[in-house]
Structure formats: structure tokens, C-alpha cells
Image: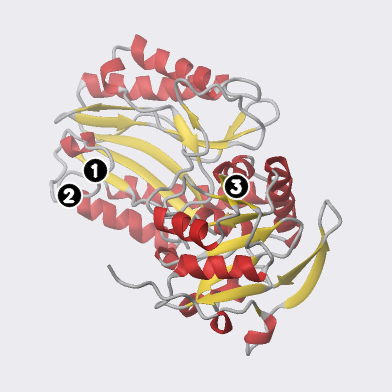
Amino acid sequence: MGIVAQPNIADHKILSVAEHTEHVTFQPTVRPTARGYQLPMISHDRLAFSPEEFVRRYDLIQSSMDDLGLDALLVRGPENITYFSGYETPGYYRYHCIVVPKDGEPVFLVRDFEWINTPEFAWSTKFVKVYDWDHAPSVTANVLDQLGLGSNKRIGVEKQSFFYTVDEHETLARAAPTNEYVDATHVLWNARMIKSAEEVEVMRRSAALVDVAMQAGYEATRPGATGDEINGEVNRALLAAGGEYMGLPPFVLAGERSCLPHQTGGKNALGRDDLMYFEISASHRRYTAALMRTIFLGKPKDEWLRAAQACIDATSAALAFIRPGVSSHDADTVARAVTTKAGFAPYHRNRLGYSIGVSYPPDWGEGEIISLQQNEPRLLQPGMTFHMPPLCLKYREYGIGFSESILVTESGCERFSKLPREIVIKA
């Protein structure tokens, strides 16, 4: 077992973004929080949202921290880091962490190679460089000590995150044994669950990108075209329209391969009487919208058309039912009753839907936050956003589905896509 080097405090001082950026393209500012703290920020035109929107998020997090009696919160998941700070990078596979003190200025621990992305995307003014040769959790322990959070403090950590490891937890416990480390995963999850007006507008842009890509897929669908060829057109359209990398690839499947969940492409060619399955997402400023459609060629089988209509009707029933105050469980039950009555219960295996918003690979959804599914008693609220993909999968025969991304409104729900939800047959 190798010896883990402890960080040299001189190499891990808390630094000012302004003092370490040669070409200053931002303005230092201060914004008051709900509790009267004057929050230092940097403002620039590359921020995905207004400073006021980020202060709103800061206030939500501080309120939840107060409920849990926390002295500080460690933000580790890339979705949570982006939500809280605006920072973006696909390099989240290396260590990143934000230390959020109670009523204090956050400190961003960022990989030295990536740190310049901080003034490019984020509003935070303080950071610490983490070098590739560091034992990163030890750096976090060091920073907690610098902030006066190294003993007899209650620290919130994201125990349910992919990124908060056993090693990190044990390192923090050894470095500060009198601290209490409690699961605060739901602090960021609960904040992200309800979207603001600014977030919804960004998601509308993502949905418009999905519509462009779906239309490209429709146009590329023809006898003789392979799944790979059609998938290529979908991806080309997404990128050409300004889409970013997605949390998952587009799921574009021809013929019987459509029955394979979460697969894409393939060299099999469409026949004269065949089907083409699409489930496509798009990301704008890391916010996702998604859409599922199935298109038919020639003379489709009667069972295919009945399955398609069942999925369309299930989605329609859910759209008519969803409104503030109904439970996630009941929304799923309403949609599932439609596919069951149509005789497709054995092939409708998935939940009705899942929350969508900020995403990074390996997922485009926020299903860990809340899902429309059986045994989920929580009630829907205005500002929640979901992708609802009822589909029927019959092994070695077909995969057929029709979905919508939606916003829960004050009186019902609103779909993001402008494309019709209907059976399309290309001659």
C-alpha cells in the first residue's frame, strides 16, 4: 500500500480569483443574501444565469443547512457544483469540491489544470488549487482547517453521490475526528427539484434543440438506411444547432434492435415495412430536455400500431392528470392503467418519468431527486420538470414509445416540445 502524501499548506492556500487571472474579464460585485450576508461574487457575461439567480440558490442551500444544523457543506457531485456555482467541465472525473460555510463565502477546490474555468463559468471568488499528485481529500481536510472548520463542527457531505468516496470520508474523519459528518445529499437535490423561471427558459432552448434533432431523424428514416446512418444525422443536427455533449447518447434504433434498452445505432438496415425508434436529449448550459418518438415505414404490423397508440394515450392521460398536489405514485398509476387496458402491461416495465434539469454523464436525468413511479408518495409542485417516456419493449420484436418533457405549472402541466405526438407512417 502506497504512502499518501499530506498536502503542504503553503501549496494549498485559499486564493483570490481576481488576483490570479491575468486578463480580467469580469467585475467583482457583492450581493445581499436573504440573511443579510454580503456575498462576494464575480459577474460576467458568460454566467449561465443572473447573479440574483445564484444568490437565490445560495439562500436555498443556506436555509437547508440551517435546518440540519450544519456549519459547512461539501458539494461534490458535478451537477450540484454546476447548479450552485455555474462552473462547467467534462473534466469532473478529477477532484472538484465546493466548501460552503454557514453564512460565508464558498471556497472552490479545483484541479490546477482546470482552474481557469472558474472565472470563465462560475461566480465564486475564492479557490484552492488541487494538483494531480495530491491526495485530494487531504486537501479538503486542510481547507476545512484553514476555515476554522477542523474541529467540533457539523459538516454536511453527499454520501449518496457517485463522487463522495469511502476513502474521502475516512480521510476527513481521520483528519478531524471531533467533526461530525452527516449525510446532506438532499440539500442540493431539494434545491434543484423546483426550477426557477430562468432555468425553465434554458430548458426551453434544450427542447428546441431536441425538436431539430428529431426532425433530422425523421427525414433520414427510409428503407435501406442503417441505425448508424440515422444516428449520425441526429448527432450532426444536434451539434450544428448548438447542442452540447449530452448526459447520455441519443438512443436511435432500427427494426428489432429497438427492443434493446439504452442501446444506439447498429449496422442493421431498415426494411420496407419497419419501424425506427428515437429517444433524444439535448443539453444547453448543462440543462436537459428529452423526447421519444417512433416512426413507421410501409405497412406496419397491427401490434406495433396498437402499442404506439397505447403509449400515446398513456402519455396523454398523464398530461391531463398531472397538476400540483397529485402524487408521483398516482401519476404513474394513471398512465400504467392505459397500457394495461390495451394489453401491453408485460411490455411496459419502466417508471412513468423522472426529474430533468442539470445533467452530466452517466445520465441525462435527475431520477435520484424524484421520479414519477410506484411507491413515490411525494406530491407534485409548480416548477418541477420531468421527462415522461411510456414505452413498450418486446424482446426481439420491437421497442415503441412516445414521450414528453414537461413543466408542472400552477394549474396543470406544459410540454416543452413543439412536435406532435402522433403515429407517423412514411410510405
Real-space CA distance between mark 3 and mark 2, rounded to the nearest whole angstrom: 38 Å
Say which residue appears at 72% left-offset and 72% top-offset. Answer: 42
Please say if 4 is above or below 67: below
In this picture, is 344 found above or below 297? Answer: above
CA neighbours of label 2 inside 10 A, class few (<14), some (14 to 19), many (20+): some
Task: Name the residue: 57% across, 65% down.
Answer: 87
Q: Position of residue 365 (x, y in %)?
A: 45, 43
Within 10 Å of the Cα at label 3, are there few (<14), some (14-19), or many (20+) other Cα atoms? many
Outermost residue on the top side: it is 341
For marks 1 and 3, give the CA distance.
Answer: 35 Å
Mark 1, residue position:
253
Report x, y in % for residue 219.
Answer: 32, 48
Query: Closer to the N terminus: mark 2 or mark 1?
Result: 1
Residue that badge 2 annotates: 266
* Residue 144 place in picture, x, y as percent: 61, 65
- Which callout, 1 or 3, points to the residue nearer the camera? 3
| Quarter residue 15 falls in | bottom right
Pointer 3 or 2: first along the chain: 3
Which is nearer the eye, 104 or 197?
Answer: 104
In the rendered image, the quadrant that contains the C terminus is top left
Query: In what element is the residue under mark 3?
Result: helix
Query: What amino acid is labelled 1 in the image?
Result: Leu
Which mark is in front, 3 or 2? 3
Q: Given the image, on which type of amino acid does mark 2 rest? A: Gly
Secondary structure of residue under mark 2: loop
Total labels drawn: 3
User: Camera-side residue: 36 or 261?
Assistant: 36
Mark 1 falls on what kind of element?
Answer: strand
Residue wearing tag 3? 188
